[in-house]
Image (cartoon, helix red, strand yellow):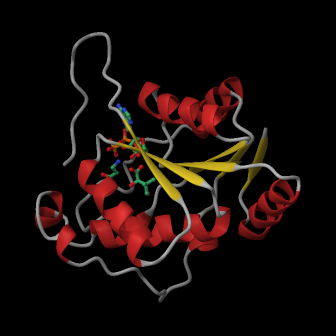
Amino acid sequence: MKISVSIPEVKQWVKAQKIAGKTVGLVPTMGYLHEGHASLIKRCLAENDVVVVSNFVNPTQFGVGEDLADYPRDFNQDCTLCEALGVDMVFHPDSQEMYNAPHVSVAVDTLSETLCGKTRPIHFSGVCTVVCKLFNIVAPDRAYFGEKDAQQLAIIRKMVEDLNFDIEVIGCPIVREDTKIQPEATI
Ligand SMILES: Nc1ncnc2c1ncn2[C@@H]1O[C@H](COP(=O)(O)OP(=O)(O)OP(=O)(O)O)[C@@H](O)[C@H]1O
Ligand SMILES: CC(C)(CO)[C@@H](O)C(=O)[O-]
Ligand code: BAL
């Protein structure tokens, strides 16, 4: 499994895969991986020749007072899981690699003003900005997102349509723990 922190390196690696005729799947994550993420990765592995998992705690989707600094991280553990699943590349950029301040952002219209967007006014613009960048960096054939984050999934589908990305967005069902304790649902 390849691990890269570099945008040009990922672009070059993906280009080589495509020249070799391989399809590319992307699973965007913020790390600290669990069974829910594993289900997205397994589906991505089943439907694509090579799989990139991005692991980046994206600062632009956290508002003031939200838990950016405290967001849980365990990159070594995440890599162990990805390797065991058969992931081909983990993309793990730092903030400097992803953002130059000030930077251009993706603006989201009405879909972001309801539900979670009411209390998190910058959140979906930050999500779309980073997902847009990941789509341009990895240029996957398919990208996988959880239905758990239903509003996020709907907004990403709309972005793909409105900004004419040639990427298939796949929504994946929620994985719940055996304990019957339901993971927090975000709509
Ligand atoms: N239990 C789950 N079942 C299926 N997909 C999931 C589950 N949990 C997260 N995902 C999906 O995995 C992707 C990455 O999610 P993320 O890294 O934000 O993890 P998270 O557990 O949702 O974290 P947070 O607690 O910040 O919401 C998203 O597309 C999300 O919808
Ligand atoms: C899609 C995403 C990886 C963008 O940072 C994040 O919002 C998430 O994990 O759901
Ligand atoms: N999966 C949701 C990420 C967030 O709430 O920032």
Residue nearest the observer in this picture, 164 or 17: 164
- Quarter of the image where one finds residue 134: bottom right
Query: Is residue 58 toward the left or the right of residue 147 in the image?
Result: right
Q: Can residue 118 be seen in this view?
A: yes
Q: In this view, does 77 lie to the left or right of 10?
A: left
Residue visible at 12% across and 63% down in the picture: 119
Residue at 37 percent across and 48 percent down: it is: 70
Residue 127: percent from left, percent from top: 38, 64
Q: Residue at x 64, y 53 (%)?
A: 92
Q: Position of residue 144 (x, y in %)?
A: 49, 46
How many marks do you count on the picture?
Answer: 0
Is residue 25 placed above or below 133 in the rendered structure? Answer: above
Point out residue 158 in the picture as x, y percentages from the top left corner. Answer: 34, 67
Residue sitting at 27 percent across and 10 percent down? Answer: 179
Q: Which of 38 and 170 is in front in this view?
A: 170
Q: Tell me residue 86's x, y (percent).
A: 71, 29
